[in-house]
Image (spheres, grey):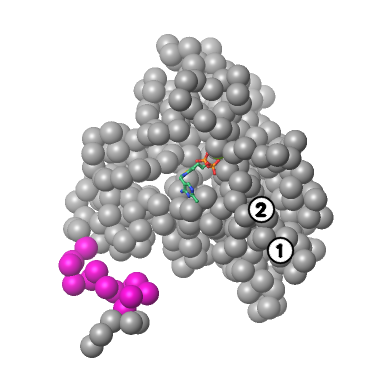
Amino acid sequence: MATKMKTESASAAAMRRLDGMLRIRRFEEQVLRMGAAGAFPGHYHVYIGQEPTAIAACEMLLPEDLIFTTWRNHGHLLARGASPDRLLAEILGRATGLCRGKSGTLHLASVELGVPATSAMVGGALPLAAGAALGLKQQRSRGIVVLFFGDAALDEGAAYEAMNLAALWRVPILFVCENNSIPPEKRKRGQFPSSSLSAAELVDVPRSLQIPTEVTDGADAQGLFDSFRRLIDDVRDSGAPRFVEVRCTRWPGNNMTWPEMIGGECRLDWAFGVRPELPELAAWVEASDPVLLYLRKLVDSGVVSLEAVSAADERIRERVAAAARFAEASPWPEAAEALAGVFAEATRRQ
Ligand SMILES: Cc1ncc(C[n+]2csc(CCOP(=O)(O)OP(=O)(O)O)c2C)c(N)n1
Ligand SMILES: [Mg+2]
């Protein structure tokens, strides 16, 4: 993958990255439409506003690398190459889904894609990922682990233990903390921070454990591509952990309760002066939408044309619509399958 990137022109790389980000954005909009229509039960989370983090991290990965993620996982799975058909079918709980309809959105995993497990427990993925990194080290693999988690994970004891052990054992893992917490001044009544730490800065925690640490701006896609290229090379070359905090401004539709497609689907012309009516969304688009800010920068500097991106966006929308048709037409799992592929199978009485 790294060799392919070296020979790629700047405009081809930019188009590939934009394509990846828009695939996530349009996919999540489809999930929001289906969620609002009651097409699947239960809670769900979308990755709108954080797209370049997943694309930047996953474009650097080799097939033997592993990723771990949380409930906010759709973008990570897509960036790692998941088929939108099978991902959406899984969210709908259908037999054609990535996990045969057993995980739904919260526990998505795919052995083929190097996504061994997702934990919907706050902080739960950190020990799993540190253990997997130890496994890779013991196998003398060139593979590394990239672990995506939210800022609230640092409220959990398991996170400290996992980071401490990863540092002591020197295992190849990149901790990617996607900090989308709502700052106190922007919180509305009833909203709460997703993390509360006694440390002054979130990164004080990994730093105190001797893990090299940095902070990046989640709204600056180009900066993320540059940082992740370096960080992943560092982890692979040193075989030791690194920690990065990506500071994102939470997409206003990501309520602390249920997500909501406020202000309608994203329009590419929002990047060029047209503004959504909703002031909250308009402010976010202007200052913090990493996809539209990247698009504007690339078009303004002549690296890509808006026509080419609009055509790509149209193809992506058609692809996502096809995924929705596939998922909705897919069967539910058979009742007889209920005990297949689960731990309980091993202890089932004959
Ligand atoms: C141990 C535990 N406590 C509480 C919850 C309920 N819960 C689900 S998501 C969430 C907030 C997570 O915030 P963060 O890690 O910052 O991720 P974000 O959703 O903001 O991306 C909470 C408290 C949980 N899943 N696990
Ligand atoms: Mg958060």
Where residue 28 sits, quadrant-wise, is top left
Q: What amino acid is at disc 1?
A: Ala
Give coordinates of residue 311: x percent, y percent: 43, 32
In the rendering, which numbered label is found on residue 47? none
Secondary structure mostly seen in magenta is: loop
Task: Name which residue lies at 20% across and 58% down.
Answer: 332
Look at the image and tell me in which quarter the C terminus lies.
Answer: bottom left
Q: CA distance from mark 2 to mark 1?
A: 10 Å
Residue 60 in view here: no
Check disc 1 and report its element: helix, strand or loop.
Answer: helix
Q: Which residue is mark 2?
A: 175
Question: Is 233 positioned to the left or the right of 177 in the image?
Answer: right
169, above or below 270, in the image: below
Q: Indicate yes or no whether the magenta region holds residue 334.
A: yes
Contact? badges 2 and 1 (CB < 8 Å): yes
Where residue 298 sits, quadrant-wise, is top right
Q: Which residue is mark 1?
A: 166
The front one of 164 and 179 is 164
Residue 40 in view here: yes
Give coordinates of residue 297: x percent, y percent: 64, 25
Q: Which residues are magenta?
A: 333-345
Task: Name which residue lies at 66% across and 79% down.
Answer: 139
Q: Indicate yes or no whether the magenta region holds residue 164.
A: no
Q: What amino acid is at disc 2?
A: Phe
Where residue 180 sits, quadrant-wise, is top right
Task: Name which residue lies at 52% across and 50% down.
Answer: 122
Check disc 2 and report its element: helix, strand or loop.
Answer: strand
Task: Name which residue lies at 44% across and 63% down.
Answer: 110
Give coordinates of residue 22: x percent, y percent: 47, 37
Question: Is 345 positioned to the left or the right of 47 in the image?
Answer: left
